[in-house]
Image (cartoon, rainbow, N blue to C red):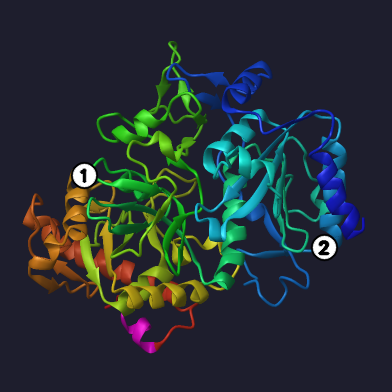
Amino acid sequence: MAEVSVLESVKALAAGPRVHANLPVAELVETSLKRGEGQLAANGALVAVTGARTGRSPKDKFTVDDAVTHNVVDWGKVNKPFAPEKFEALLGRVLEHLKERELFVQDLYCGADAAYQLPIRVISAYAWHALFVRDLFVRPDAAALATHVPEFTVVAAPEFQAVPERDGTATSAFILADFTRKIILIGGTKYAGEIKKSIFGVMNFIVPNKDVLPMHCSANVGADGVTALFFGLSGTGKTTLSADPARRLIGDDEHGWGPTGIFNFEGGCYAKCVDLTEEKEPQIFRAIRFGSVLENVILDAARKPDYFDIHLTENTRAAYPVDFIENAVIPGVGGHPKNVLFLAADAFGVLPPIARLTPDQAMYHFLSGYTAKLAGTELGVIDPEPEFSACFGSPFLPLAPPVYAEMLGKRLTQHGASCWLVNTGWSGGKFGVGKRMSLKITRALVNAALDGRLDKVEFVTEAAFGLSIPVSCPEVPAEILNPRNAWADKEGYDKTAADLAARFEANFKQFDASEAIRAAGPKAK
């Protein structure tokens, strides 16, 4: 299939007789229900079940290896090469599979800042996927829609099953990025998050060349108009902490930091739902209503979502437009941040609740991207295990991590931003012994950092990781600020902290970092 015919075939797919283009929310919900794709919950959200794949499939993700990518992409475990001829052949089979089906097209943008917007088109066989992407990306107004020309197209065929021996895939599922033809090809998975994250990967490839740092972080702004960023892996509180009633939300997951400030890549939020209550997370709870999508959430007999029932998966999710959050910033742009927070759910219970990082420590912990996996959440995980994800988003980084780290370091220095490490995990012992840090305490610590109150207290250096920690903080018990003090078993703390420090050191060996940055990390004793 020649390149021109490939592009023309994809374009023709979006203009076929059974294509529903840019349907509004109500029609997408009606169509999804009519087609049996989901159920309507009592709160008005559309509930879809994704089957065997209830999360991303990183082993099924590939990038086409050609002249555009060969010398640029950081090839390895994350970015696996895919032959151009294999891509063409598989695309042809997918197009044949889709041509007789009803299809749903949405023309959208990635990027709230008009100067850096990427026009995208999503073509899917499911109406609920169309609703999902309409929720999560930036929705053009009528005038913009009339002149919209997609620069990247996502073709999603959830019911097409690849044959690895024939197609060159790892399994029956695939997420393929072709940066020459500007096509994302997805099949064999119903999990809608693949669409969202594939476009994030595209932005991570193209915007560094436009002097924009792409970031896997949330962002909000205070009454003083000053922006804050929250980096963190799934389950660390990125969405929860940024959805603060006292601050205005810019976005909960993906942002760019350019010459004029911060902008949201998305027009919606994708929140974890496990154990969600209105009392703990009122803004997120109230955002889940008509027009929202719930993934793999169980409904009770009255069709009320049971956020505590995770027998399908712990990775239950809600997608909703960002303006469903009260006080959201529309459009999602903000000034240069003055505070950058790295969130880690430390299940070992040895990191301090909050620490102020030096510039070198900031680079070290950004490259490390630490959190912890919990016992019971994955097959074979008995004790807590460290999880390191460079730049807090390694599955989505086509370029080498130091490229992004260097950009962050320059911006922190240029704009005089403070950097903090926040443990949203355990205190007083590891998972199973200690207690999870309460959201109330974490919010108090974060707020004190953001409003400058922590600038007025004394700091000391704790011994295990060389981190600068406050000796006091308003509304927070002083005894938990130094994690060793919170453990009854001091010897147990020392052993656990030394073990985690050794794992940090082992992980960091992969990076070609300066001696100053390397020396800023924890040292195993």
* Residue drawn at x 86%, y 30% as measured from the top left: 100
Give the residue pinned by disc 2.
84
Find residue 314 and report its horizontal and vertical position in percent. 45, 37
Question: Can residue 519 be found in the magenta stretch?
Answer: yes
Query: Helix, strand or loop at disc 1?
Result: loop
Which residue type does callout 1 highlight? Ser
Q: Quadrant of residue 350?
A: bottom left
Residue projecting furthest to the top: 302
Q: Is residue 64 visible?
A: yes
* Residue drawn at x 82%, y 36% as measured from the top left: 98
Camera-side residue: 176 or 371?
Answer: 176
What range of the chain is rendered magenta?
515-520
From the viewer's perspective, tell me whether residue 221 is left or right of residue 312.
left
Query: Helix, strand or loop at disc 2?
Result: helix
Which residue type does callout 2 highlight? Pro
From the viewer's perspective, tell me whether residue 355 is left or right of residue 283.
left
Q: Quadrant of residue 372?
A: bottom left
Give the residue pinned by disc 1.
438
Find residue 176 and report its horizontal and vertical position in percent. 71, 54
Please tell me whether mark 2 or mark 1 is closer to you in this view.
Answer: 2
Figure label count: 2
Find residue 469 and report its horizontal and vertical position in percent. 16, 67
Name above or below for residue 53 compared with residue 230.
above
* Residue drawn at x 54%, y 45% as measured from the top left: 138
Label at residue 199? none
Q: Quarter holding the C terminus?
A: bottom left
Q: Quarter holding the N terminus?
A: bottom right
